[in-house]
């Protein structure tokens, strides 16, 4: 399985709530840029799963242009404080080959650390509009390998 982990692009500092924060103009440019860079890798994605937060959905909208046949699946479990173990179980149950998650930190940093290092203690950073491609035969702690990292 290939799991693509994409953090949202740069968002405004504040809004009426954290979930309502939108991308800045620079963030919109970043989202379009990472979509172009990702497209150069000719990805074949089976499902795109996104946080319901505005900034993640705006970032995902740029990526969704690459996969017009797919519907965007919103998942409240991949918000900043999401449960990485629950998400790993869900991904394993999908029985898909390539899944793209569009989410936030610390969730993505925790998930990436757990998949690759077997522990969240390694604190692997995931920058804004950065995509990590993780390959694994089994969705389990320490079973992933980063194939590549893309930045806008």
Image (spheres, rainbow, N blue to C red):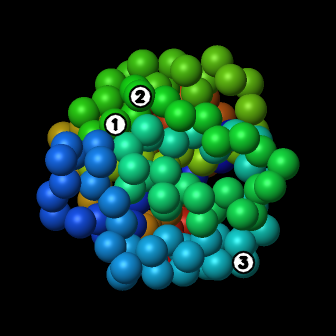
Disc on the earlier residue, 3 or 1: 3
Residue 9 in which image quadrant: bottom left
Q: Which residue is mark 1?
A: 79
Q: Are marks 1 and 2 in contact (CB under 8 Å)?
A: yes
> Dot 2 corresponds to which residue?
76
Decide if residue 55 is on the left or right side of residue 62: left
- Residue positioned 42% across, 19% down in the render: 86
Residue sitting at 18 percent across and 47 percent down? 16
Q: Which residue is mark 3?
A: 40
At 84% across and 48% down in the image, what residue appears?
Answer: 69
Q: Quadrant of residue 128?
A: bottom left
Residue visible at 39% across and 50% down in the picture? 54
- Looking at the image, tell me whether mark 3 or mark 2 is earlier in sequence order: 3
Q: Label 2's element? A: helix
Q: Secondary structure at mark 1?
A: loop
Res 26 seen here: yes
- The percent position of residue 147, horizontal first and vertical second, equals 57, 61
Q: Does residue 146 appear anywhere in the picture?
A: no
Give the percent coordinates (x, y) of residue 122: 22, 47
Label 3 – label 1 distance at C-alpha: 28 Å
């Amino acid at each position: 399985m290939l799991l693509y982990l994409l953090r949202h692009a740069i968002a405004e500092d504040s809004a009426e709530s954290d979930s309502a924060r939108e991308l800045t103009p620079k963030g919109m440019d970043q989202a379009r840029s990472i979509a172009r860079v990702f497209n150069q890798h000719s990805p074949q994605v089976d499902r795109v799963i996104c946080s319901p937060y505005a900034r993640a959905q705006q970032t995902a909208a740029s990526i969704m242009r690459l996969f017009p046949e797919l519907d965007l699946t919103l998942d409240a479990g991949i918000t900043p404080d999401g449960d990485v173990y629950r998400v790993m179980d869900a991904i394993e149950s999908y029985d898909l080959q390539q899944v793209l998650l569009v989410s936030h930190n610390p969730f993505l940093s925790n998930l990436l650390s757990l998949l690759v290092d077997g522990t969240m203690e390694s604190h692997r950073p995931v920058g804004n509009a950065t995509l990590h491609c993780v390959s694994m035969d089994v969705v389990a702690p320490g079973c992933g390998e980063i194939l590549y990292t893309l930045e806008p």
